[in-house]
Amino acid sequence: MTGETAHRSTAATKEVNGPGIIWHIPRPTRNEETVPEQIEQPTFTPRPVLSFVRRSGRLDARLQRAWDNYADTYLLDINDGEGSLDVRDDFTLDRDTIAVTWGNANPLIVEIGTGQGENIVAAAAAHPDVNFLALEVYDPGVAHTLLLAGKQRLGNLRIAQVNAPELFAATAPGSIAEVWTFFPDPWPKMKHHKRRIVQPQLAQSIHGALADGGAWRIATDIEDYALHVHEVMDGRTDFRNAGTIAVSLPTGHVGKGNAELADDMPHADFTESERFDDRVLTNFEKKGLAAGRVIHDLTYIAV
């Protein structure tokens, strides 16, 4: 998502087209006879609902240098064409891919939406015997993760700039040890809840990708999102909620700007987890705590 001058020297310039196509069929004149069957109707494939919106932006000089210096080392070439966030049809994430990419058979942890990379880089540095894959779609976040990883010369971290659901759909069963989703975009408007990354279809794909007993760890500082996660995950038979803490949450959604209304709604107890030890206190989380928000940690084990 860079301008025309940004990181053209790399193999991963990111641009996307506009949101859709406007079809224009000329109106017939009075002397023309229009036969409906002869009008060729446009065909199209509905676009999937995405959990993100890519906005245009430029890399500053520091991040541009990080991209130029480290992209070849850390950024996986699995995209279906330049500027695409789709995963190539011929790519499969399996044990053989892990062995070739990381050079070992160590367990793999995938983080969805790594932001600036603070958490996954810290985890990779603390656990050199574990492989890590960062999924991030925004150029500045990818570049900052490259910067942090390059500074520490990490050998067990890779980055993929692709749509997360496609990555898990391209993953062989049992290939991933854990999936992390920390502070995903809350999409607070009711009409946008369908864009939230935690959805039944993704849960099914992640379950298929996880090894037996593998975990999906989720954290959010938005109460309404915590309720959303419980609604999606707690009733599933392929995951077990591993939490041990009772948390009271409203039983309905209030939408953007109406958080105070939740206090007067009926509440129920839900089960959540202690703070995950390997989730570092990022700048993003600090801002949430400073604003008085409560952090919700949720852990689901594949069964």
Image (spheres, rainbow, N blue to C red):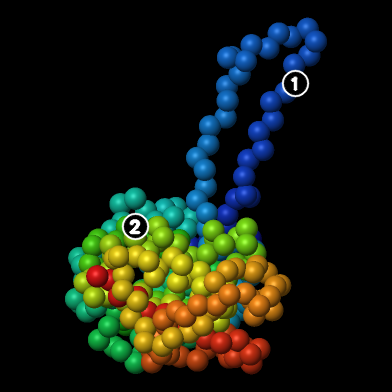
- The 10 Å Cα crowd at callout 1, few under 14, some 14 to 19, many 20 or more, is few
Name the amino acid, label 1.
Answer: Arg
Q: Please give left or right for residue 211 compared with residue 244 in the image.
A: left
Name the amino acid, label 2.
Answer: Ala
Decide which of 176, 90 is in the foreground and name it. Answer: 176
Residue 86 seen in this snapshot:
yes
Q: Is 88 placed above or below 106 here?
A: above
Quadrant (top left, top right, bottom left, bottom right) of the N terminus: bottom right
- The 10 Å Cα crowd at callout 2, few under 14, some 14 to 19, many 20 or more, is some
Q: Could you tell me which secondary element the residue under label 2 belongs to?
A: helix
Q: CA distance from mark 2 to mark 1?
A: 44 Å
Quadrant in the picture for residue 133? bottom left
Mark closer to the chain start, 2 or 1: 1
Q: Residue 16: x, y in percent?
A: 57, 54
Identified at 30% across, 89% down, the residue is 127
Q: Please give left or right for residue 29 compared with residue 155 in the image.
A: right
Q: Residue 227: x, y in percent?
A: 51, 73
Q: Residue 211: x, y in percent?
A: 23, 71
Decide which of 282, 248 is in the foreground and name it. Answer: 248
Quadrant in the picture for residue 212? bottom left
Q: For residue 169, which numbered disc appears in the image?
A: 2
Q: Is 275 placed above or below 142 here?
A: below
Decide which of 188, 158 is in the foreground and name it. Answer: 188
Q: Could you tell me which secondary element the residue under label 1 belongs to?
A: loop
State the residue position of label 1. Answer: 27
